Amino acid sequence: MQYFSLNNNAKDVSFLEAVRKGLAPDRGLYFPKEIPILKESFINNIGQYSDNQIAYEIIKPYVGDDITNDYLKKIIEDTLSFNFPIVKITDNIALLELFHGPTLAFKDVGARFMARCLSYNNDIKKERNLTVLVATSGDTGSAVADGFYKVKGIDVIILYPKDMVSIIQELQLTTLGKNIIALEVEGTFDDCQEMVKTAFVDPELKEKINLTSANSINIARWLSQMFYYFIAYKNRPNPDKKLLISVPSGNFGNICAGIMAKQMGLPIDHFIASTNINDTIPEYLKSGDYIPKKSIQTISNAMDVGDPSNFIRIQKIFNNDFFKLKKNLSGFSYTDKLTEKAIKEIFEVNGYIADPHGAVGFLGLKQYMDAKEDAEAYQGIFLETAHPIKFKSAVDSILKTNIKTPKRLKKILGGKKKSSQISQYSELKSLLISL
């Protein structure tokens, strides 16, 4: 499989080269030259396959011969070392829990897959040290930090907006040390992301260091997120009904992976992009005009993105046909007050404690289904993308509860924060050159 830049001004590259580069030299996102279609017999008999077998069938065409079959199977085994339970909320609405990985967030899948692909690349090609540069609005950084911790030959630089991530998220970013360096940025997530993109096209940095990104702009992070859409389909309640999936969306990598899964043949009837008040995409779906906005801080901070990088990939999937895109994707945005109300509603229905992101996903799914005259013909699933402990203060305040801390977090809570503060790109560049 070859990958091309969506800016159409760079050479095509192989899978591992695209993973290692992160962003194309022309600052474009990489996209596969073709989207493979899975055999109908595979989809019809998906219940007969293990999760690892499913993941291998999905990702193998994208990897090609860059990674040996046996090693790719080992990467998948290491990546999917935890479960993806489905929890019923109502007769027609359920949620998919994606927080059973080491950092309690959905991004563990992509981060672990990418880290192992790069480790393989380093072992095989014996290239010079690699620096992974990543911007985070919360969960990406912690997943990347865990996935790459102590990986030989790889340094990780994580940029996050100061005072805009939860306490637990910040501790996950800043307490590891070793090859993980955390930088607090005076600004928003969009400012962090812009610094990362600028670094990738800086000619001086290109000469001195090897850079890649672990944001969902990286194809290994992005494409591997298709795994759990297939797993959800295999284990869905009411398999005789049409499937709807609502995705809490920030940088739009996760929902883009789901749409890719559908393009490969997974029978998902419709996607709902559920956002907080950072509503660039819901507004685009109304007007057809893409107008980036400065991001606004909310209680669902991982979605505080005003200019989502991955949406250009969704547009490419539909060949920039706005009306075709709208047939497959709806978008709704919600305030913090509505998010809090949804957390209460889910808890009152069956005692389930949802995090703010999952609650936004629930709202979008419910709004879409409530407008359908034949709603009973659908099974809706929304994604619960992070454990509520990561937003303990907000959730406990809303529900008057006391969420218990999972054992795996107790060591982190006692860790010492190690971070530096920056406010402009020149400071990041100086740090990168000094490594």
Image: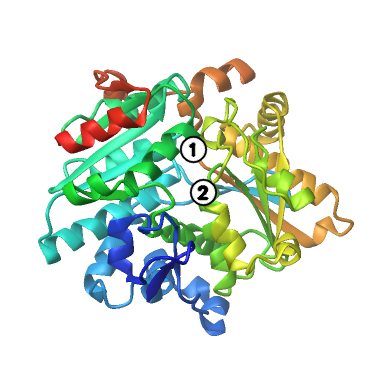
Q: Quadrant of residue 240?
A: bottom right
Amino acid type at image mark 2: Ser
- Is residue 23 or residue 109 the one in the foreground? 23
Please tell me whether residue 357 is drawn above or below residue 16 in the rendered image: above
Q: How far apart are marks 2 and 1 (CA)?
A: 21 Å
Q: In which quarter of the image is residue 171?
A: top left
Residue 385 in view of the camera: yes
**Dot 1: element:** loop
Which image quarter holds the N terminus? bottom left
User: Residue at position x 37%, y 72% from top?
Assistant: 12
Q: In this view, does 122 lie to the left or right of 224?
A: left
Amino acid type at image mark 1: Ala
Question: Marks 2 and 1: which is nearer the front?
Answer: 2
Please tell me whether residue 146 is drawn above or below residue 27 in the rendered image: above
- Is residue 314 or residue 299 the one in the foreground? 314
- Residue 370 in picture, x, y percent from top left: 83, 47
- Name, please, the residue furthest toward the front: 203
Return the mark for residue 351: none
Which image quarter holds the C terminus? top left
Q: Which of marks 2 and 1 is nearer the N terminus?
A: 2
- Residue 112 in picture, x, y percent from top left: 31, 51
Q: Quadrant of residue 9?
A: bottom left
According to the picture, the residue beneath numbered tag 1 turns out to be: 386
Q: How crowded is mark 1: few (under 14 residues within 10 Å), some or many (20 or more)?
A: many
User: Residue at position x 30%, y 30% from top?
Assistant: 426
According to the picture, the residue beneath numbered tag 2 turns out to be: 309
